[in-house]
Image (cartoon, rainbow, N blue to C red):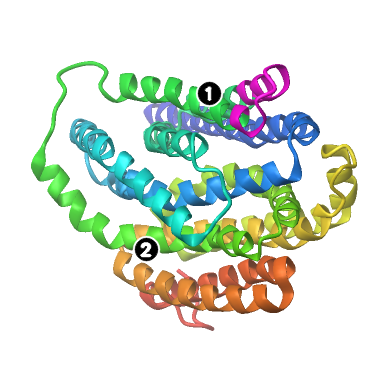
Amino acid sequence: MKIQMGYNLRTIKLNSQLQSQIKSTGVYLLVPVVNFAVSIFSTPYFAKYLSAEEFGQFGYYNSITSVIGILFSLSFNTYYMSVYHRVEAPERKVILQSITLFLISWNIFFLPFAYYVIVLFIKYSGSAIQIYPLFAIALAGASIGIFKFFLQSDFRFKNNAFLYLLIVSGYRILSTLAGIYLVMHKSLGIHGRMLGIFIVEIAFFVISLIYIFRKGKIKFDKSKLSSAWKVVLPLLPASMLYVLLVSYDNFVLERINEPKEMGFYNIGKGIAYYVYIALFPFYQTFETSIYQYTIQKKIKNLKKIITGLLLMVSASVVIFWGLSGFVINYLTAGKYPEAVVYANITVMTSGLMILFSINDAMINALQKSKSSLLINAITVIAFIFICNIAATHFKQIGVAYSTVLGYVLLIVLQSVLIIRTMKIKSGLKSQ
């Protein structure tokens, strides 16, 4: 009788856990649905009120802030994810508060320095890109925007799907609505688009600080920060190099000095990026499992996750190719059909970014940050060389294909590292 009762209790517990997991997964899947719906809703408005040149500017500003953004966060967000399951909750809270206090102090000094360096870069490079106030807004937003990612990590690792939905999709909805209001009703153009993002970044910065320093005494532990630095130092240049892979295309395009074509490129790239937006939350649903299975070397479990995500990525890219002309015609009100060719190329990059994320999570779980740095360095050097040659001979089309080749090389090198580290040989039976 006791055995039967014990069995029933375990069954009830397992069923309860399964129901909870299904419910959480359903909420997580709302994130790509909501974000995609927001993009579909907002793009026609921005296409109507912003010029192709302004889309080009927006892409350029995003590229700059992506590179500088690594120096705002110093890759501490990645470190926080890597130690989340290695320490208990009280210690984890001290680590997060110590990191946050340090980053706030760091950014107070680094922000004006970064702005000054960018001003000099644009001035002496002969660029026609507008500096003030757009770069000031973009950089300030990037410097305070890093803290909401700690909340996202916390909610995801705690499996608090509803709060994760609120922080991710809430930010997306509010920043888009603020941009639409300022662009449409205040006729602020590209200034309104960027100012709308900045206003919402301020709100989420305040929310992030309230969450991080809630309940109890604020603590700063130098020893925790010192331990973090040992892991972060190799991650930092590796992250910088990766962001160059993501953003270098706009630096090359700006030098070609065809602002309208640069605008078409960024419109196509932006719409193709919706595929990444739609797919990334699916990856995030399995991210904690990828970390766990990699550490435990559960190869069969990893293969199932990777195969499923790979099939999803491949299907999404193929479907996009079939619908891209219609989608871009609808989203841009027929104004920018020239963007279709760029979208069809850069959508491959959007898919490859998911595969990179899988490999990157496994490498972080294996704590192979120095090897990751070497791989990123090799990839970026090769990519910059290929991109400049391609831009000279094939202009914007060459640049688009270069990004695809760069990601293919990166993923291949990552895969070799992972296979060697986990000692998996072709033909051997998986664990």
**Image side of residue 30 versus residue 64, left or right:** right
Q: Earlier in the sequence, mark 1 or mark 2?
A: 1
Label 2: which residue? Answer: 238
Q: Where residue 194 sits in the image (x, y, percent)?
A: 56, 32
> In the image, 80: left or right of 4?
left
Q: Which mark is residue 379?
A: none
> x, y percentage for residue 396?
71, 65
Residue located 55% across and 43% down the image? 130
Q: Quadrant of residue 147?
A: top left
Q: Amino acid at mark 2?
A: Ala
What range is drawn magenta here? 177-192
Residue 77 visible at all: no
As rendered, which of 11 and 154 lies closer to the eye? 154
Quadrant into which the N terminus falls: top left
Magenta residues: mostly which secondary structure? helix
* Residues under numbered marks 1 and 2 in contact, where contact means CB atoms less than 8 Å apart: no
The residue under label 1 is 166
**229 or 84: nearer the eye?**
229
Disc 2 element: helix
The image position of residue 308, as x and y in percent, is: 64, 56
Could you tell me the amino acid type at mark 1?
Leu
> Element under label 1?
helix
